[in-house]
Every structure is written in structure tokens, then in C-alpha cells.
């Protein structure tokens, strides 16, 4: 017997973190066929009608890769790691950054984009967000294969720490999903957030270590703040750890390998918190969809 | 479970507010969201209406037990769809309480939940997953759904190329195969063609005993035949909950210019239309309430089948003819070997009927399955499409249940008191309200030598007496 009362429209502020996690687990389990079906539907049909189809997954990172690698060759940007080919250095950054940016964009817009389905079919909102994250993970997996092929073709011998690369990538996806959980609810009230996010991610692209490191010791507070942001930390540090080895971390510009570990853990830690926030507020938004 | 509460749905004091200016609700809404997410308890929302707010639903109270069907009627904007959305948990109430035992599902919007780029077959899987069905169950039921929807090769075409009717076929087929405790349908059969509509009605008929239905329809006939109870909503308020015939009669008093209280007063004061008149109507599209009874009257005099007579009434445009005429129908799973004969003589121009002679007809058929709500009728229409007479077995036995097997009905009628002209006869066999068989039979010419005005021809006896005395008390003075 399910009961809807007037107080239900006020959300559920008393929901605790363990309760939210149990609910999330139950939702994922109950709706796993739905999530699988939605994933197939969204993932396989998003490029339907386009000439390149699923190749867009590779074309999208290739466009900035070609542009900025060319600019670096012309000397506009300087590469921070001369031991790595520019394409690999930039490709690594683009791959991780896109995993973060696309997850954030997809999840933030998930409820607004699918508002008709939510109202018409009662589709669980968390399922939509999960599918959005799975889409990014799907792209990430495909692009990772392409990057591995590039490493092989360019005869780059990565360090054994490359095995940890999926962990770092998934950490960024988890961070973006966490932010997306909260932003998706806010975007229902202010859709401006979606445009703001697009612009912000455009700027962050250049401030997250994709093309080069942020200089140290400048005394510039803005630079120091950017260096502390988790996207930068993970992209920059994981690139050196996975492609060159931990000695670069110890001897180079990275303060400590633990910084990478701590940032990764922090990204995953955001997830249960964000899910709790999401479940507390999700029942409020239907009237505004 | 013995002793279990049979109530599937209970609604107490339910209310839902909407704002005419949603933009002004953003800031407080976002503030409430952030406070709730942070874990701060939100004080109860005021029950009173705030600026720019209005009640989309106000103080609804009703319950629905397992196996019952409730029809909801009301003008546009009465709150019917909002109520269904609340029941389906798409919207949250602002006041009151809703208790649902089990799961509710249904179709509340045309094409709802279909992805336009996916094929019909892919959409079956997607929608079934949405209804919580396992992959095995989906695989098991897909052939049945395909057979029911009967979309042919279109099932592998993207849904975006489907017509509205095709979407409804698919949506209804899915909904009816993945059943929930409460099935909710919002005016979805209005766009289906006659044959599919009959198929749906048969399916609903078989499910009625074990499932609970909530039906929103402008087709008053559906409401009166399918529903045990009906609810009349007007401007978000519950006007009347009761027997479908009473509620449909009350519906005639609804007018969008009246307040709910005025409608209540009007229902109380005005005499209700004759019982059964709504029941006999067949409205297939929304009717403006102010002219509801005129509309029902018009529909009750539905003209014959389009192929009945090549010289059809000239005053009907082809569009109107298509709109009004029903196609012939045969539900092959339920009936076969239908035959008919009557006692009318025939000449070179067709059957004819001599005024004053008795009229009898005989209909034989074989039922392949029992008909719990059997009904047979022989409606007779005139050239203008007006229903002249409809001898109906319902008069003979209101709830006749007929077993499977061969049956023969013989109809004896008194001399038809109709005027000179041509008349069309149809045969309609129903497992009420769904049609099992419907066909134009024949037309006949009424030979009535002494023509008169009007539809009915009687044999009046006039007496002329010479009386020069002034009008007395026994006559009403007119001039």
C-alpha cells in the first residue's frame, strides 16, 4: 500500500544517507531492465540519422585534439611532458575531461530533457540520471580503446600504473554524476543553469590540464585555486602516473602521489552524499517540470 | 487473501493547486528545494490559495474497490487528467491523502512513453521495462502484444511514422498485457478505429471482473456501460459521485460559465433528463456540455452504414457521413454462421411493406464463446438517418447471458406505424457494450397509400360536431 499525502509534496528532508543509499540500490536493482533498455535507446539512437553515426564518439574528441596539437606544434601551447607525444598527452586530457564534462552535462539536463517522459510515464528520475552517466561511461570505454590503440601505434610504453586509469576516469564520472544529481534538480527551476554550465565547461577545458600544466609559484591566487580543483588534479597527475610512472610524480611538479589518491576517494565520496540530496528533493520538482 | 482490505484506491480530501504564473514560483520553489536537500524540515505549505494560484482539484473524496470501475466525466479543465496524474504519481497533491494498494498504470496521453526513433517492437520492450516487466516476461508476451496491436509490418518501423490510431493500438496493447492493480485510461479509445475499439472493449470486458479500472472518457456510453460508479468533476470540484446514469444526467447541467456551486444548485433544482437517454446515446467525440442533450439526440439518430444505400440522404456531406456512420463489424472469435430472414414480400424494386401488416424476422447464429451481456437489436432508420425503431432484446431480458452454441431469435412486431418512405434495417449483436456483429441487412419501402406529415402514421378518427355554445370550463381559452 503506497500512500501519497500532502506532505509528500514537501520532499523528504529527513532521509538519511544510509536510507538514500538503500533506496538507490533498490531502485537500481528494481529498474535494471528499464535502465538497460533506456541505455540502449538513448545510446544507440542518439546519432540515428547522422552520416557518421557512432563515429561521432571518436570525432568529437578528435576535433580539439587536431586543433590544439597543431597549435602546440606551432608553439602556441607548450607541452609539459616532452617524454610524451603531444597527441597522447592531449588525448589523455581530452578523454578524461570529456568523461567529466559529458557526464555533468547529460545528468544536469536529464530531468529537463525528459520532462515529458517523467510526467507521462512516471519513469524513475534516478534511472534517467544513471542512464546519462552510463552513456558517458560507454563513450569513455570506446575512446579508451582508441587511446590504447594510439599508444600502441605511437610506440608509447606506458607504466604498469595504466591499469589504474579506469579508476581515475570513473572517479571523474562519479564527481560529475554527483554534481549532476544536484544540478539536475536546480535546472528544473532555472534552465539557465544548463547554458551557464556549457559556458563554464568551455572555460574549464583550458584550466584542467588538458593541454598543459598550470604554472606553479606564480603567487597568483587564481592559478593556485585552479590547481586545486579535482578535475585538474586527476587529469594531470593520472596522466603522469599512468603514462610515465610514479617517479615523475615524486620528482616533478606534483606535490605528492597521495594527492591523487585522496582526490579520487573524494570524488567517489561525493556520490552517496549527492544521491541523498537528490532523493530528498526529487519529489518537489514534478510541479515545475 | 481472506479478510484483506479490498480497497484499491482511497482518496480523502485531495487537493492540488497550480499557479497561473509559474515563473513567480521559481524563487520560493528553489529555496524550498535547497532547504529540503540540506535536510531542513519545511513547514507545511499553506492550504489557502496564494497569489495567482487556483485549485486544479479541491476536496476530492472517493474510494474504489477491487473489481470496480469508476468513470470520470467533466468538461475540459475540470481536473480529470490532473487527478489521473496524481493517482499515477506523476504529480503530488498539495492537500489530502491518496492510498493506493498495489500499482497503477495506464495510458493518459497519446503516444506517451514512445521513443519516436525506435521501432514499435523496440518500444514494446522499453515500455514493458518501464512497467517493471522482466526480460523473460517481455519476451513471452511480445507475440501476444503484436497480435493485439495488429500493426503488420509497421511494427518494425519507427514510431514517428505511426498515425495516432496506431500509437493507441500499440500503447493499449502494451498496457493491457502488463496489467497493474489499477488501470487508468484517459480518453485513449477515441482515436482508435471501430474494429480496434471493439477489440479493446472485448478485452476490457474480460478483465473487468478481476481488475479495477479508472476511465476518463467523453464517450458517455462507455462510462454508462463500463463503470459501476461515475464521478462528475467541475472546475476541480467533486460535484457528484454515484450511479453512472445519475452522474451523466447531472453532467448535462455543467457549463463552463457556471461555478461548481451553481452547477450543484442547477442539478438539485432541474429535473433530470429521462433515465436511459444517456445510456442510449453513442457519443464518439467530445460534446460541448451546453448542447449535450441535443448532441446525444443527434447521435442517437445515427444514419445507416455508408454502404447501405447508394442513394443516401443528399443533405449529408461525405465528411459528415464518415463521421456518423459505423462500419460493418464481425468479431470472428465469438460468432459465426449469422443468417437472417423476414416476412416482407419483394418486388422488382426490392422489399416492400404494406401498412397494417405484422412484421416478423428471424435471426440465427452460432456463438463460439458465451456472451455474458448478450444483446440483439434491429434498428430501423429512415432516409434522413433518424432512428425510427430499435427492437432490442434488452427490453425482453435486461441482462441476458447467452451460452456458446447455436441460437435462433424470432421477432414479432406489431404493424409499423411509420409513414410512407424507404427504411433501412440493421442487425446489431453485442456482448454489451462491445459489438460482436454489426451489419446492414436490407431496406424496404413502406407503402402507405394515405400519406401524412411526420414520421409516424396513425389512423386518426376525427369527429365534427356542431356546437355554437361559448367555451366552458372544460376548454382552455387560447384566443
Image (cartoon, rainbow, N blue to C red):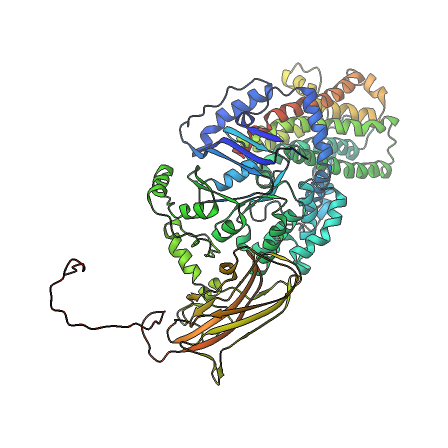
Residue A214 in sight here: no
Q: Quadrant of residue A152?
A: top right
Q: Does B173 appear above or below A137? A: below
- How far across and down, in percent of the image, does residue B187 sit? 52, 49
Farthest-out residue, bottom: B348
Q: Quadrant of residue B375?
A: bottom right
Residue B264 in sight here: yes
- How far across and down, in percent of the image, does residue B175 sit? 63, 47
Q: Nearer the viewer, residue A34 or A61?
A: A34
Q: Is residue B51 left or right of residue B108?
A: left
- How far across and down, in percent of the image, does residue B437 sit? 58, 64
Q: Which residue does the image show at 47% across and 72% down from the upper left?
A: B424
Q: Nearer the viewer, residue A165 or A269?
A: A269
Q: Does B400 appear above or below A93? A: below
Q: Nearer the viewer, residue B408 or B272?
A: B408
Q: Is residue A247 left or right of residue B275?
A: right
Q: Which residue does the image show at 77% across and 26% down from the upper left?
A: A168
Q: Quadrant of the N terminus of chain B?
A: top right
Q: Which residue does the image show at 57% across and 21% down from the upper left?
A: B36
Q: Is residue B135 left or right of residue B95?
A: right
Q: How many marks?
A: 0
Q: Is residue B261 left or right of residue B211?
A: left
- How far across and down, in percent of the image, does residue B319 sit? 46, 65
Q: Does B208 appear above or below B163? A: above
Q: Quadrant of the C terminus of chain B?
A: bottom left
Q: Nearer the viewer, residue B106 or A288?
A: B106
Amino acid at each position: 500500500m503506497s500512500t501519497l499525502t500532502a506532505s509528500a509534496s514537501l520532499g523528504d528532508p529527513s532521509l538519511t544517507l544510509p536510507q538514500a543509499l538503500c533506496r538507490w540500490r533498490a531502485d537500481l536493482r528494481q529498474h535494471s531492465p528499464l535502465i538497460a533498455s533506456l541505455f540502449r535507446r538513448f545510446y544507440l539512437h542518439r546519432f540515428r540519422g547522422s552520416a557518421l553515426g557512432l563515429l561521432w564518439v571518436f570525432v568529437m574528441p578528435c576535433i580539439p585534439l587536431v586543433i590544439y596539437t597543431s597549435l602546440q606544434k606551432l608553439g602556441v601551447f607548450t607541452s609539459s611532458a616532452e617524454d610524451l607525444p603531444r597527441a597522447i598527452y592531449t588525448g589523455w586530457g581530452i578523454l578524461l575531461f570529456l568523461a567529466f564534462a559529458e557526464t555533468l552535462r547529460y545528468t544536469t539536463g536529464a530531468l529537463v530533457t525528459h520532462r515529458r517522459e517523467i510526467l507521462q510515464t512516471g519513469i524513475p528520475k534516478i534511472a534517467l540520471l544513471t542512464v546519462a552517466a552510463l552513456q558517458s561511461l560507454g563513450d569513455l570505454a570506446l575512446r579508451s580503446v582508441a587511446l590504447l590503440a594510439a599508444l600502441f601505434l605511437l610506440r608509447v610504453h606506458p607504466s604498469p600504473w595504466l591499469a589504474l586509469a579506469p579508476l581515475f576516469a570513473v572517479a571523474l564520472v562519479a564527481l560529475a554524476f554527483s554534481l549532476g544529481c544536484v544540478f539536475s534538480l536546480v535546472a528544473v527551476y532555472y534552465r539557465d543553469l544548463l547554458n551557464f554550465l556549457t559556458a563554464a565547461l568551455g572555460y574549464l577545458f583550458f584550466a584542467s590540464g588538458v593541454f598543459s600544466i598550470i604554472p606553479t609559484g606564480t603567487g597568483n591566487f587564481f592559478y593556485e585555486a585552479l590547481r586545486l580543483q579535482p578535475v585538474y588534479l586527476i587529469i594531470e597527475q593520472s596522466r603522469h602516473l599512468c603514462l610515465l610512472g610514479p617517479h615523475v610524480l615524486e620528482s616533478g611538479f606534483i606535490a605528492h602521489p597521495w594527492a591523487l589518491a585522496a582526490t579520487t576517494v573524494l570524488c567517489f565520496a561525493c556520490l552517496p552524499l549527492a544521491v541523498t540530496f537528490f532523493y530528498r528533493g526529487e519529489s518537489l520538482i514534478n510541479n515545475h517540470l | 487473501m481472506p479478510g484483506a482490505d479490498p480497497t484499491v484506491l482511497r482518496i480523502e480530501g485531495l487537493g492540488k493547486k497550480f499557479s497561473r504564473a509559474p515563473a513567480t514560483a521559481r524563487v520560493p520553489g528553489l529555496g524550498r528545494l535547497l532547504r529540503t536537500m540540506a535536510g531542513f524540515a519545511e513547514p507545511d505549505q499553506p492550504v489557502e490559495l496564494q497569489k495567482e494560484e487556483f485549485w486544479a482539484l479541491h476536496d476530492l473524496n472517493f474510494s474504489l474497490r477491487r473489481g470496480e470501475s469508476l468513470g470520470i466525466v467533466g468538461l475540459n479543465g475540470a481536473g480529470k487528467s490532473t487527478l489521473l496524474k496524481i493517482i499515477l504519481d506523476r504529480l503530488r497533491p498539495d492537500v489530502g491523502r491518496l492510498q493506493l494498494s498495489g500499482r497503477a498504470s495506464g495510458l493518459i496521453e497519446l503516444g506517451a512513453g514512445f521513443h519516436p526513433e525506435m521501432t514499435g517492437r523496440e518500444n514494446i520492450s522499453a515500455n514493458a521495462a518501464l512497467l517493471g516487466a522482466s526480460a523473460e516476461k517481455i519476451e513471452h508476451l511480445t507475440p501476444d502484444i503484436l497480435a493485439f496491436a495488429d500493426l503488420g509490418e509497421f511494427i518494425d518501423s519507427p514510431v514517428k511514422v505511426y498515425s495516432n490510431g496506431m500509437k493507441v493500438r500499440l500503447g493499449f496493447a502494451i498496457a493491457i498485457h502488463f496489467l497493474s492493480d489499477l488501470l487508468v485510461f484517459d480518453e485513449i479509445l477515441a482515436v482508435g478505429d471501430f474494429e480496434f475499439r471493439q477489440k479493446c472493449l472485448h478485452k476490457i470486458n474480460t478483465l473487468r471482473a478481476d481488475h479495477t479500472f479508472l476511465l476518463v472518457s467523453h464517450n458517455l456510453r462507455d462510462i454508462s456501460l463500463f463503470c459501476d460508479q461515475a464521478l462528475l468533476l467541475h472546475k476541480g470540484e467533486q460535484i457528484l459521485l454515484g450511479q453512472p446514469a445519475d452522474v451523466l444526467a447531472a453532467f448535462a447541467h455543467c457549463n463552463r460559465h457556471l461555478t461548481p456551486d451553481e452547477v450543484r444548485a442547477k442539478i438539485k433544482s432541474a429535473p433530470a433528463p429521462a433515465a436511459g437517454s444517456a445510456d442510449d446515446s453513442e457519443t464518439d467525440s467530445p460534446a460541448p456540455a451546453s448542447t449535450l442533450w441535443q448532441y446525444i439526440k443527434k447521435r442517437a439518430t445515427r444514419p445507416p452504414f455508408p454502404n447501405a444505400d447508394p442513394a443516401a440522404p443528399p443533405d449529408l456531406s461525405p465528411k459528415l457521413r464518415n463521421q456518423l456512420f459505423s462500419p460493418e463489424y464481425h468479431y470472428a472469435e465469438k460468432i459465426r454462421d449469422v443468417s437472417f430472414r423476414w416476412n416482407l414480400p419483394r418486388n422488382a424494386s426490392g422489399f416492400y411493406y404494406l401498412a397494417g401488416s405484422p412484421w416478423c424476422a428471424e435471426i440465427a447464429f452460432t456463438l463460439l464463446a458465451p456472451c455474458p451481456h448478450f444483446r440483439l437489436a434491429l434498428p430501423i432508420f429512415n432516409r434522413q438517418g433518424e432512428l425510427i425503431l430499435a427492437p432490442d432484446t434488452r427490453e425482453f431480458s435486461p441482462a441476458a447471458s447467452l451460452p456458446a452454441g447455436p441460437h435462433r431469435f424470432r421477432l414479432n412486431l406489431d404493424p409499423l406505424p411509420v409513414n410512407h418512405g424507404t427504411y433501412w434495417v440493421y442487425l446489431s449483436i453485442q456482448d454489451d457494450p462491445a459489438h460482436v456483429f454489426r451489419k446492414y441487412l436490407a431496406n424496404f419501402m413502406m407503402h402507405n397509400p394515405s400519406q401524412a406529415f411526420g414520421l409516424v402514421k396513425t389512423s386518426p378518427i376525427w369527429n365534427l360536431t356542431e356546437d355554437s355554445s361559448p367555451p366552458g370550463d372544460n376548454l382552455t381559452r387560447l384566443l
